[in-house]
Amino acid sequence: MEAFLMGFSHFLFVCLLFTEPRRHSDFPRHRGWLEVICGSMFSGKTEELIRRLTRARIARQRVEIFKPALDTRYHAQDVVSHNQNSIRSTPVQSPSEILLLAGGATDVVGIDEAQFFDESLVEICKQLADQGTRVIVAGLDMDYLGRPFGPMPALLATAEFVTKVHAVCVCCGELAAYSYRIAASEKQILLGETDSYEARCRPCFLAGESVKTPGHEQLAENKKH
Ligand SMILES: [Zn+2]
């Protein structure tokens, strides 16, 4: 019985793993596709993007990485994750620049913080994939109120491969899918880190939202000091 359970859990583990497609075997040559890595803040999206891009480079594929020019939290040119892994990237103002810069000579295009781009990113990713490029997009699937964020829903719907990664709830330790904003701002885009956001599970996110009052601004200020 024990052996059966171990075998079954191994089977589940293998099923849950992202199966990294290889250009020349799993897919016909010169065919592209779209992968999306989504999740809340602190869920490891960017680490997973960097991992896949690094592996593509080891396989001697031509890799280009882009991010929205507005995301300058860490470094103007690098895609940097929370654990300080980084990879050289090109900041762009709009998705159409990605198409121009990636051109036809790129095997793999990585795009970080995709939620900050407008809806035209969906068509750009489609065009790149149609042209034979492997496109890997990472982004927040929900904003600070739990609403689908920017072009992410359409990207998730049109991707061949979707990976949802989870953070750990800072309140209870369960899996977290929400980015709970502790800073007082009602703008959808507020760049920030642990001073502005917490990863929370659904019950802890709801509990936090229910106590937010007009005095929340002062509470958030007190928490920082
Ligand atoms: Zn929780």
Image: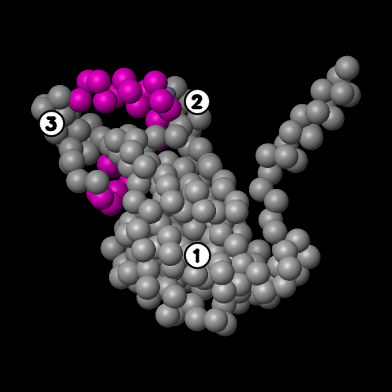
Q: Where is residue 34 in the image (x, y as percent from the top left)?
A: 56, 59
Circle 1 crowding by C-alpha within 10 Å: few under 14, some 14–19, many from 20 = some
Q: Position of residue 148 (x, y in %)?
A: 36, 42
> Split into 4 quadrants, where in the image is the C terminus?
top left
For the residues labelled 2 and 1, say whether their Cβ atoms are less than 8 Å apart: no
Q: SS for tag 1?
A: helix
Q: Distance between the residues labelled 2 and 3?
A: 28 Å
Disc 2 under 8 Å from ligand 1? The reply is: yes
Camera-side mark, 3 or 1: 1
The single residue placed furthest to the top in the displayed view is 1
Residue 139 seen:
yes
Residue occupying image coordinates x 26% and y 25%: 209
Residue where numbered disc 3 is placed? 218
Residue occupying image coordinates x 88% and y 17%: 1
Residue 75 seen:
no
Q: How far apart are marks 3 and 1 (CA)?
A: 45 Å
Residue where numbered disc 2 is placed? 174
Residue occupying image coordinates x 56% and y 48%: 162
Magenta extent = 189-212
Relative vertical location of residue 168 with respect to residue 206 in this rendering, above or below: below
The first of marks 3 and 1 along the sequence is: 1
Residue where numbered disc 1 is placed? 126
Q: Is residue 8 left or right of residue 127?
A: right
For the residues labelled 2 and 3, say whether their Cβ atoms are less than 8 Å apart: no
Camera-side mark, 2 or 3: 2
Q: SS for tag 2?
A: loop
Q: Which amino acid does label 1 sit on?
A: Lys
Disc 1 under 8 Å from ligand 1? The reply is: no
